[in-house]
Amino acid sequence: MNKTYQRLQKKIKKPKLPGLETVKNTYSSRGYNIHIEFPEFTCVCPKTGLPDFANIIIDYIPKKKIIELKSLKLYFIAYRNIGIFHENVVNKILDDLVAACQPVSMKIVGEFSPRGGLKTTVMAGFPN
């Protein structure tokens, strides 16, 4: 692995993010999918300090709890001043959402806007 990349990884602070709230899944006996998109996601590139823009897509099959949307919005807004790589942010979101609602399955997609002529899409899922 590139030493510059390793050094940058060490500089990423553990982000202080608001807690995610959940509500009871009234239809827990039924398997259904919840699809959420947040097209106004922003974070900061830890290498350049420039803003990164993305559409974050969440697809999950809930068990007993579903994610409360206002808390999810506040959680996403908290990333605006956090320096974090695309791959890290998508996996961090997955970890936090799975911990909060313990779904049957979940997939997070981060479609990042092009910068420097490169468009990045990162996908992470649970279970793997």
Image (spheres, helix red, strand yellow):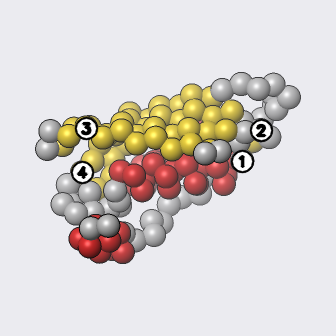
Q: Earlier in the sequence, mark 1 or mark 2?
A: 2
Per the model, the C-alpha gap separating discs 1 and 2 is 7 Å
Per the model, the C-alpha gap separating discs 2 and 4 is 35 Å
- The residue shown at (32%, 71%) is 6
Residue beneath label 2, please? Answer: 63
Q: Position of residue 24 (x, y in %)?
A: 78, 39
As displayed, is residue 124 above or below residue 57?
below
Quadrant housing residue 47: bottom left
- Mark 2 surroundings: few (<14), some (14-19) or many (≥20) residues within 10 A: many
Per the model, the C-alpha gap separating discs 2 and 3 is 34 Å
Per the model, the C-alpha gap separating discs 1 and 4 is 31 Å
Q: Earlier in the sequence, mark 2 or mark 3?
A: 2
Residue beneath label 3, please? Answer: 119
Disc 3 vs disc 4: which is toward the camera?
A: 3
Q: Are marks 1 and 2 in contact (CB under 8 Å)?
A: yes
Residue beneath label 4, please? Answer: 51
